[in-house]
Amino acid sequence: MPDRLSALDASFLYLEDSTTPMHVGGVAVFRRPKAGFDYDKLVDLIEQRLSLVPRYRQKVVQVPGRIARPVWVDDPDFDVTYHVRRSALPKPGNETQLDDLVARLMSRPLDHSRPLWEIYLVEGLEKNQTAVITKTHQAMIDGIASLEIGQVMLDVSPTPRTNVENLWMPQPEPSSLQLVADAVTDIVQRPGELVENVRSAALDTVNTVEKVFNAFGVLASAVLTVATPASGSPLNVRITSPQRRFAVARAQLDDLRAIRKQHGGTVNDVVLAALSGALRNWLLSRGENVTGSTTIRAMAPLSVRETDPDSGNNVSAYLVDLPVGEPNPVVRLHHVSHAMRAHQESGQSVAADALVKVSGFAPPTLHALGARAASSFSRRLFNVIVTNVPGPQVPLYAAGARMTEIFPVVPLAKNQALAIGVTSYDGGVYFGLNGDRDAMSDVDVLATMVEESVEELMGTASA
């Protein structure tokens, strides 16, 4: 039988349109070693590791008439150099230029006639640095057990681990007649899926989003929040193009831990409180009316313990109202901690260190699952998505080059102007802010305010 996409995976193909590309990305910055880190080395590395991610040699093929969900098939024309590309900044390339390049690359849809991923090696960066930008369609990230290409290319030592590359021979691509015959067999065995597939073929977005919602659900403690629409915000606008802007911010994990130690809560609470302060200042800089009761609702996907051992979904959507109307940073943190305490007390929460032990370095996968959870909600229910994924606190390497920073690029949900991804790694905390080009022309200003908000909280910890 064919390797058919699940209803959830297929939904991300159906949800994608000209203004909402559905790929998740990452920007990793490396310090180039004396031996060099160039395009040829990256291609060789990816070729050696592709056997660990067989999906990356497969493409999506639609069934004629869309009488069934699409299937994954080996790409007989697979060419790794089509997917691994090179780019360069005018030397010495600075961070602003890199952010602009990331925005342009993330604005382009993936080629659906080929495997749904791309990697770019970016040369010309200042300070002897090289960047690697990854793009992977969310249809390929089908659960926590999935691996993403950005994970398998990394090692814990400057000496790359040995990986036996098996000779890969693509399976013949099925004919249209075979695709139809397999679909009919599936329909006979599961007749209830016929109606579902017809609706999907008609791009029944309501049905599709409902499937995503059912797959992830929400924590019981968030039900009351779900019942109340989010307040109006400049973050909820009609997106008219796929063009994006990207900016980054940084913090030190020890600083966030010091704030947590002083005031209680969790590191995630501190991250959300810092974002609350940044969003408050951003709204004020725009001349928005901010009162004591003003909030911005964040959809913050959280890792939860699995109740079904066979389930791959262990990221649950959680809605939290960020107290942007509160001028006092410590009170903001207490508000956030109180709102998030229900999740901690539910018994479903997963500690950061436990999550890293279970998943290894899986930020790309977990950010993708978080973005999936966001797609399950109406834009009326939240204003911004914030995914916070812990990473290992030891250095990682690609082809001998040490990774110094890693910034997530979380896709925008429908009619959402901003998505924020956060990843901790090797003592640092890295924020990636992905915004609509028109609605978030000042996303770089917001990124600066994130760092200022962390400094403000640090002032309260050392006082």
Image (cartoon, rainbow, N blue to C red):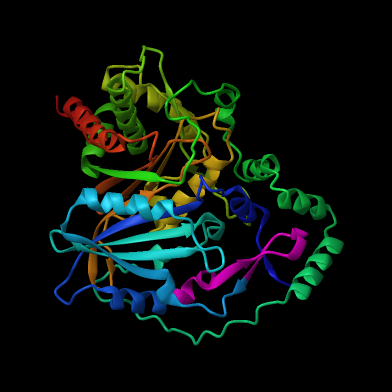
* Horizontal side, residue 441 vs residue 63: left or right: left
The C terminus lies in quadrant: top left
Say how many tags the image has.
Answer: 0
* Horizontal side, residue 2 vs residue 27: left or right: right
User: On the image, which quarter does residue 50 sit in?
Assistant: bottom left
Residue 58 falls inside the magenta stretch: yes
Q: Is residue 186 above or below residue 230?
A: below
Instruction: Identify the residue at horizontal 52%, vertical 68% (top origin).
Output: 115
Asked whether 358 or 36 is in front, the reply is 36
User: On the image, which quarter does residue 148 sit in?
Assistant: bottom left
Q: Position of residue 225 (x, y in %)?
A: 55, 24
Instruction: Identify the residue at horizontal 23%, vertical 51% (top origin).
Output: 97
User: On the image, which quarter does residue 264 sit in?
Assistant: top left
What range is drawn magenta here?
49-72
The N terminus lies in quadrant: bottom right
Q: Position of residue 3 (x, y in %)?
A: 67, 69
Residue 360 visible in the current orientation: no
Name the residue furthest bottom: 167
Q: Is residue 183 above or below residue 463?
A: below
Residue 362 falls inside the magenta stretch: no
Instruction: Identify the residue at horizontal 38%, vertical 56% (top origin).
Output: 105
* Horizontal side, residue 69 vs residue 163: left or right: right
